[in-house]
Amino acid sequence: MSRIIMALDQGTTSSRTILFDERGKIIASDSAPLTCYYPQSGWVEQKPEEIWDSQKQTIEGVLRKQNLKMKDITAIGITNQRETVIAWDRKTGKSVGHAIVWQCRRTANYCDQLKREGFDEVLKRKTGLVTDAYFSGTKMRWILQNNPDARQLAEKGDLLFGTVDSWLVWNLTGGKKHITDVSNASRTLVFNIEKLEWDEEILNKFEIPKSSLPQVMASSEVMAHTDETQWGASVPIAGIAGDQQASLFGQACFESGTAKNTYGTGCFMLMNTGHQLTISQHGLLTTIAWKIGNKVTYALEGSVFIAGALIQWLRDGLQLFNDAKETEEMARSVDSSGGVFVVPAFVGLGAPHWDPYARGTIVGLSRNTNKNHLVRAGLEAIAFQSYDVLKSMEKDTGMKLKTLRVDGGASANNFLCQFQADILGLIVSRPEVVETTAMGAAFLAGLATGVWKNLDDIRSMWKEDQQFKPSLVASDVQHFIEGWQKAVGRSRNWMSD
């Protein structure tokens, strides 16, 4: 019987469990929706018990579908929504309050205060991150300041903090293990990514007790086992990585200078920078990609806030089409965007511009403009925003990208992939299996348990579905980029403080 790897993919809107065989093929999957709660403007929460129940439901569902038991599973890999924080009681295993989700902005004022004090420079130097409410550290501080139960438990040494991976492991092991991996730790704003340890200076500043934090493990090693009394088998949990890092691994971007772009609601680009950490001069994040054995691999990360969300807006807000699948044909029905540029700065601009006061802009309209031009300009805008981030990565590292590997929902759009290849002047490659996040978790777990011997084994399982080669001449590319930059300039600094 083929060895089976189980990947738990715990996301913001759903929990999924996917089974892979030793050839890297999906043999079964199960999914359950997950609710976000919005108690007030800018606040986003989830219920920790709901996160675990939904994940447990999909584990049981996928085993049932294949008529398998937990003892038939060789290893478990976990990948998760990053930066979401859960607090729980070490003795009872019960959560303390709700999980604070990565999207939550409740600590923005405290982040502004840290910047005024100049502490953001300390945070950037030690953690590779910008000082923002997005990351976990300020959320932990908020819980301690605002939840009396959490404070009481902390004083007794019984409070535990963890990102979603830690919470899943705690429940899978029946409360025996409180661990995380380096990739998730590197997103907390309290982890020193050079020394690979929780940073005392930052913990003291945030007043977070070190005893509440998980033990930090490699991303690929046998780090825990499922609780036999609960699951009927002691299965090794052997791979953990945050979702974007898992996707980079699932795309087999193992060499320095390789990169992937996930086209989802936003875009997430990660570039493998090897064993040297590179602090960005262009507003990108330095993060840990993974640790295998004693070797740490670093990455640069850049995000585009609005990508697939722009297509949703064109569909639901402007009602230009009924289904996103129509956009490819609409874009191809005109020979250009007719000089129209869309800058989807609905919530400001991210890297490399970092302008929270920018707003969405459409420029270049004429009487000849029709909805097909707008749709084409919308798809082009996703590629232009990705271009800005990827070019910043090249400047930061001095490395020239050769290929961009793509995944995520919008990567199914051939027009978008071709235009991305054209303006970047490099090959865009789409894999056969676009479930790269779960696949990355499975690969990390299988590597640690001998299902695959080395990275070459894994590399051989990555299969290309389609390749898009650049077809534009340099002068045309230059013309496009100049138009885009001009349009971005019009959108900037639109709102007053």
Image: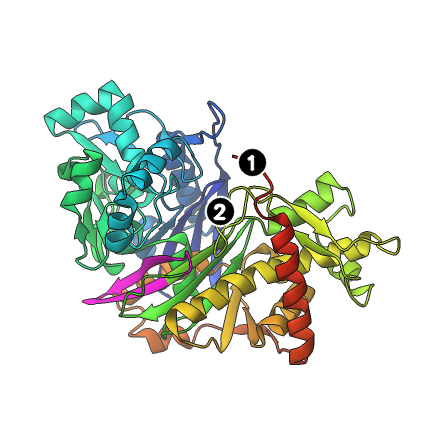
Q: Residue furthest top?
A: 148
Could you say which is closer to the camera, residue 283 or residue 194? 283
Could you tell me residue 87's position as x and y percent?
27, 32
What residue sits 23% from the left and 53% below the top?
Answer: 126
Q: In this orientation, does residue 84 appear?
A: yes
The type of colouring in the image is rainbow
Residue type marked 2: Asp
Could you say which is closer to the camera, residue 407 or residue 370? 370
In the rendered image, which residue does mark 2 sit on? 30
The N terminus lies in which quarter of the figure? bottom left
In the rendered image, which residue does mark 1 sit on? 496
SS category of the residue bearing label 2: strand
What residue sits 55% from the left and 61% below the top?
Answer: 386
What residue sits 49% from the left and 47% below the top?
Answer: 30
Could you tell me residue 262's position as x and y percent?
51, 58
Q: Is residue 249 left or right of residue 346?
A: left
Tag on residue 96?
Answer: none
Looking at the rendered image, the disc whose residue lies closer to the viewer, 2 or 1, is: 1
How packed mark 2 is, by other alpha carbons closer than 10 Å (few <14, some 14-19, many 20 or more), is: many
SS category of the residue bearing label 1: loop
Q: Is residue 71 left or right of residue 396?
A: left
Could you say which is closer to the camera, residue 326 or residue 300? 300
Where does the magenta region start and end? 282-299
Query: Could you tell me what secondary structure mostly forms the magenta stretch?
Result: strand
How packed mark 1 is, by other alpha carbons closer than 10 Å (few <14, some 14-19, many 20 or more), is: few
